[in-house]
Image (spheres, grey):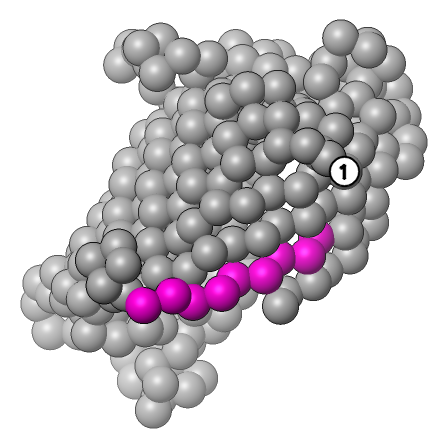
Amino acid sequence: MPMSFSYTLDKFWGVGNETVETGTEDYFREDLDIQLEVQVPPLLFFSDLSSFILDYKHTNIVDVEDNQFLTDESITGYNGGDLFGVGFGLVWDRRDNLFYPTSGHYQYMKFLVYTEPSDYTFTTFELDVRYYKKLFKKSVLATNLYFKNVSGNAPFYELAALGGHQRMRGYFQGRYRDNNYFTLQTEYRQYFWKRFGFVAFGGIGDVSEEITDFNLNQLKYSFGGGLRYLFNKKEHVNLRMDIGIGGDGNTGIYFGIEEAF
């Protein structure tokens, strides 16, 4: 049963895909997250792995700093609150390796309903599709399609958020938020000397209030590259360092274990 507590300096630019930088986006928040997943027979949903999910989240907006949006009571979630959710997760996994796939595909689907006694009532749906193909010696092309939909009266911090260390690298996670978010990214991975390797990646994506509002002419983009070091040869686990550049000119540097996707 994963449980986490965090005290975070976060940022909120408002809702929508045309928000602008003002220099007053910072705010402090506390989060307590507890999630319980109970596995059920896969045949129930015709998937490789199926689970029922119970989710509890408590968020406290500690200090809004000079963020003009969080002094506006019309912003849902401006003062935090409690969330109680229930739903299910489905996994189809045909990858040849968990940590560094070179072939196969992976699909993950999650649906959650947050209702009373939650302070906000809404639903979330996530779809994560990944495909891997070996190209040349020690090289792989990885592709990822991700979509998230949030319907109902969701607090701003639970809206679909563009950016972060996995998708649309180069954008701060949450630089753009709204009810819907999709992104398509691809990454070329190559080992070049002993345990050292590099990657080159690029992606497009956007957020929107309605699914029909997505506009190809307004898509955001990001690109970048990184280095890899194979520190666990048996399990094929890499240490990674990526530099991502967003279409807004911002840059993100990311360190971690395993691949972005």
Is residue 201 at least partly visible in the picture? no
Residue 38 counted in the magenta span: yes
Q: For this view, does 8 lie left or right of residue 1?
A: right
Task: Check disc 1 and report its element: helix, strand or loop.
Answer: strand
The answer to whether 78 is drawn above or below residue 29 in the figure is above
Farthest bottom residue in view? 234
Q: Nearer the viewer, residue 166 or 49?
A: 49
Q: Give x and y (percent) for residue 189.
A: 26, 62
Q: Which segment is the magenta one?
A: 33-41
**Which residue position holds label 1?**
82
Q: Quadrant of residue 194?
A: bottom left
Q: For this view, does 86 lie left or right of residue 187?
A: right
Residue 207 counted in the magenta span: no
Say which residue appears at 48% left-offset and 46% top-offset.
87
Q: Quadrant of the N terminus?
A: bottom right
Q: Give x and y (percent) for residue 144.
A: 28, 46
Q: Nearer the viewer, residue 116 or 16?
A: 116
Say which residue appears at 55% left-offset and 45% top-offset.
86
Query: Would you say the magenta stretch is mainly helix, strand or loop?
Result: strand
Q: How many marks?
A: 1
Is residue 69 at least partly visible in the picture? yes
